[in-house]
Image (tube, grey):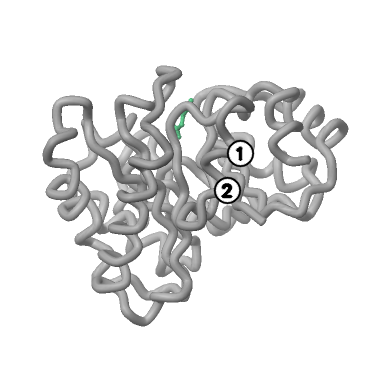
Amino acid sequence: MSIICCNWKMNGSVELLNQYAKSLPVSEHQLVLLPPTPLINAAIKILPKEWAVGAQACHAESHGAYTGMVSSELLAEVGAKYVLVGHSERRAFEDESFLSSAFYKAEAMQIQPILCVGETWDERSQVYEVLTKQLALLKLAKLPEIWVAYEPRWAIGTGKTPEVSEVEVIFSWLRQEIQGLSPRQSDKIRLLYGGSVGVNNFQEFFSSKNIDGGLIGGASLKLEQIREMLL
Ligand code: PGA
């Protein structure tokens, strides 16, 4: 069984939720949907119970004058179970200290953070240095599970992916690094690969023993593709 985590980004609609509910097969995979925040409530009502619903980001503060942002407190109130922290499309305006506070606020509200890490194209030769910095905040993680999505930034939405053999080396390093940072959760580490996962390559990625599942963006908006991945 793999984890299939769908990141709709700023896409989707109530209609797409209804299509998910009507046309997707019952799946043995662990399913998580991250719709835009205004759809969280509808997603919880419309989707079958095997889908957990989460958010794509949360603020580091519990409340305050932060127009347009959303706190973990509110996400918990509407029933979100997961939240992305540090997605690369947000890292430009969320620094490490913000992300660390956002991560721990989510944990405090019993929302499972999914920490997103990954290097840019230019950083490929220093990938381990980049990942070491991005993972450092896990040192104080408290929830029983740790979820990390490795997404090379250059693979997101581009149709380019690294070789599965290259990714496997990174994933085995990631697991060891996280075990070192958070020994308490060492057997509860969930590692997702993200970046241009689709029908043509998901089997290759998901059959790798070090990869627990995928964070799927563009392909999760295409019913045919997501259906095939769930079968
Ligand atoms: P993609 O996005 O599957 O469209 O590359 C993945 C993500 O941004 O999480």
Q: Position of residue 74 (x, y in %)?
A: 50, 53
Cβ of mark 1 under 8 A from ligand 1: no
Quarter of the image with the N terminus in it: bottom right
In the rendered image, which residue does mark 2 sit on?
A: 207
* Quadrant in the rendering for residue 146: bottom left
Asked whether residue 169 is in view, the answer is: yes
- Amino acid under label 1? Gln
In the picture, measured across the screen, residue 231 lies left or right of residue 101, that is: right
**Residue at 67% from the left image edge and 24% from the top image edge:** 13
Numbered label tally = 2
Left or right side of 146 for 203: right
> x, y percentage for residue 94?
23, 40
List the residue tagged with mark 1: 203
Q: Residue at x 15, y 53 (%)?
A: 133
Quadrant location of the C terminus in the rendered image: top right
Circle 2: is it few (<14), some (14-19), or many (20+) Cα within 10 Å?
some
Q: Amino acid at mark 2?
A: Ser
Residue 88 position (above or below residue 182): above
Quarter location, residue 118: top left
Instruction: Tell me if mark 1 has few (under 14), some (14-19) or many (20+) residues whose alpha carbon lies within 10 angstroms of its own.
Output: few
**Above or below for 83 versus 204:** below
Q: Position of residue 220 (x, y in %)?
A: 62, 29
Comparing 64 with 147, the one in front is: 147
Secondary structure beneath dot 1 equals helix
Q: Which residue: 41% across, 69% down?
A: 108
Residue sitting at 30 percent across and 30 percent down? 153
> In the displayed structure, would residue 202 be above or below residue 97?
above
Q: Nearer the viewer, residue 154 or 202?
A: 202
Residue 89 is situated, as x and y percent measured from the top left of the image, at: 33, 29
